[in-house]
């Protein structure tokens, strides 16, 4: 099985589907077109299952490695590899992407173009999670912006144009800083390979090479890489593009943006910034802890003030992803952290990254169903009594909401619990402040639950129908996973636990 280029297939099979839809989609019937796009999107999950059958969690290095010379003059290689860190977002992409297409089945205008752009976006995101040379990693990173821009602008809401341009400008600016930082790293080291750069950092050779650049470059390299990744997550205060982009995007695209693309930034922090710049990250950690807390607390309070349900869920995403960075910065802030406490914080980060992708995608799908039923309305006060007329929908949305809230027994609890255990052991004051975010999260989610699903049946709600077959199939896998991973989180933890244990045992 290892002789097959499985990682390349994971990336490029969706692109084959995109090409087929672009060339022949116009001539296909609506059902055939949707089946073609859905089938190629499911290829990621099918191939990931094949990878899981041969994946060895105890091996902390890269597996299924594909390494070929590409541009010899620049020492650029086509280098793919997979470890526990990369496996999680690849699995998440394989689960969420087909469901995003199911949630987009109402789209009729330019449906073949929509499907082609979505598959292009899916493949680009997978390339980010699997590439190990900055040259083609950055190509995938930037290429993901193109289909995302058009998906938001062409199929989004009334403010989609402004939101799409804001999204692209912010992320292009972040990418420019990232490119500048790695250009300096290449000048200093002569390589763009992540594995080689990580080895140089671990042996203490990287810092002297970067310092030899002189001037402000040692700090500028770290700052450039940091800014490029911070915009993508996004880390407060670089988050202002996110609420508009998520709110104006069509439902399936919003699900992908929050479920997959936001994880690209967190993944970059763990794959690049964490191993390459431990000293700079340690020096900046007190300030970065404050920024992460800003995302945790202010993101939750901003969500509490929203009357647009989509913007509420968007701000909730800022809050939940900030927990991941809070744990990472808490580990970096301590000179000699306890290995068990650090492992708890890092395990919580990886688990939260995966679980948030499921619950946030489900919440956006639920808001999209409300919007479709009501003719475009999605205000907090536009509904009421939905539970009475659509009990199955209310049950599914309730599970997603309580998962996001962190209810014990559902998947969202375990990651947040591990993060708080780790952060409290490393920076107790930060854990105490972050509890304000938990309180605000409970307030806005329970307010949403009460006003939309309970009380008297609102005007226009009485005609709501319950979930149709496509909506049921969109939400069911996510809800099942929320229960399964809430009771058996070790199914996911086992895939990365040896890697996290190795990280914690070898902290600089």
Image (cartoon, rainbow, N blue to C red):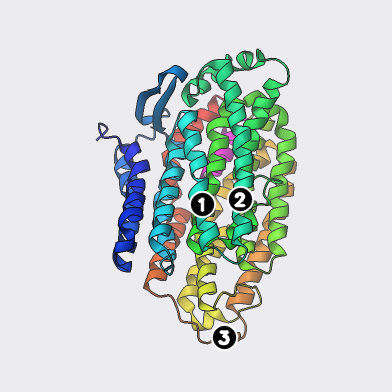
Q: CA distance from mark 3 to mark 1?
A: 33 Å
* Neighbour tally class for label 1: few under 14, some 14-19, many 20 plus, Cα within 10 Å: many
Which residue occupies 47% across, 19% down? 74
Q: In front: 166, or 438?
A: 166
Residue 66, percent from left and from top: 35, 29
- Mark 1–mark 2 CB contact (< 8 Å): yes
Circle number at residue 148: 1
Indicate which disc, 1 or 2, sits on the residue closer to the N terminus. 1
Which residue occupies 63% across, 17% down? 210
Residue 17, percent from left and from top: 33, 51
Above or below, comparing residue 101 to residue 504 in the picture? below
State the SS at label 1.
helix
Residue 68, percent from left and from top: 35, 24
Region of the chain picked out in magenta, as a range: 338-353
* Neighbour tally class for label 2: few under 14, some 14-19, many 20 plus, Cα within 10 Å: many
- Mark 2–mark 3 CB contact (< 8 Å): no
Residue at mark 3: 460
Indicate which disc, 2 or 3, sits on the residue closer to the N terminus. 2
Q: Is residue 350 magenta?
A: yes
Q: In the picture, residue 29 is in which quadrant?
A: bottom left
């Amino acid at each position: 099985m290892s002789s097959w280029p499985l990682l390349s297939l994971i990336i490029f099979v969706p692109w084959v589907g995109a090409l087929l839809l672009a060339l022949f989609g116009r001539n296909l019937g609506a059902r055939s077109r949707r089946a073609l796009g859905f089938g190629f999107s499911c290829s990621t999950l099918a191939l990931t299952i094949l990878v899981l059958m041969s994946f060895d969690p105890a091996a902390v290095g890269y597996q299924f490695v594909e390494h070929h010379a590409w541009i010899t003059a620049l020492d650029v290689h086509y280098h793919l590899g997979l470890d526990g860190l990369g496996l999680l977002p690849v699995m998440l992409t394989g689960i969420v992407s087909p469901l995003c297409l199911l949630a987009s089945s109402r789209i009729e205008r330019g449906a073949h173009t929509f499907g082609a752009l979505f598959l292009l976006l899916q493949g680009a995101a997978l390339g980010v999670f699997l590439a190990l040379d900055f040259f083609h990693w950055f190509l995938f990173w930037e290429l993901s912006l193109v289909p995302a821009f058009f998906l938001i602008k062409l199929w989004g809401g009334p403010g989609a144009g402004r939101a799409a341009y804001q999204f692209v400008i912010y992320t292009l600016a972040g990418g420019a800083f990232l490119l500048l930082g790695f250009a300096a790293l290449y000048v200093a080291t002569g390589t763009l390979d992540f594995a080689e750069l990580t080895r140089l950092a671990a042996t203490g050779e990287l810092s002297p090479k970067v310092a030899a650049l002189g001037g402000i470059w040692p700090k500028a390299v770290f700052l450039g890489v940091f800014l490029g990744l911070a915009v993508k997550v996004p880390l407060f205060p670089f988050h202002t593009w996110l609420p508009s982009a998520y709110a104006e995007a069509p439902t399936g695209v919003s699900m992908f943006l929050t479920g997959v693309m936001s994880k690209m930034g967190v993944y970059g922090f763990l794959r690049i910034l964490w191993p390459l710049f431990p000293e700079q990250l340690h020096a900046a950690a007190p300030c970065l802890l404050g920024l992460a807390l800003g995302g945790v607390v202010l993101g939750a309070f901003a969500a509490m003030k929203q009357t647009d349900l989509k913007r509420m869920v968007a701000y909730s995403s800022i809050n939940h992803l900030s927990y991941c960075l809070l744990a990472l910065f808490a580990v970096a802030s301590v000179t000699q952290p306890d290995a068990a406490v650090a492992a708890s914080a890092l395990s919580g980060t990886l688990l939260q990254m995966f679980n948030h992708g499921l619950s946030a995608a489900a919440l956006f799908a639920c808001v999209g169903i409300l919007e479709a039923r009501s003719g475009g309305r999605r205000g907090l006060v536009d509904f009421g009594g939905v539970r009475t007329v659509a009990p199955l929908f209310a049950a599914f949305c309730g599970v997603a909401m309580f998962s996001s809230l962190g209810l014990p027994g559902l998947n969202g609890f375990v990651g947040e619990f591990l993060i708080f255990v780790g952060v409290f052991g490393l920076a107790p004051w930060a854990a105490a402040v972050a509890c304000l975010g938990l309180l605000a999260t409970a307030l806005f989610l329970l307010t949403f639950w009460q006003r939309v699903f309970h009380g008297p049946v609102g005007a226009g709600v009485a005609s709501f129908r319950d979930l149709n077959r496509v909506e049921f199939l969109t939400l069911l896998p996510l809800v099942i996973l929320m229960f399964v991973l809430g009771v058996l989180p070790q199914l996911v933890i086992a895939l990365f636990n040896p890697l996290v244990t190795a990280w914690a045992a070898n902290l600089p």
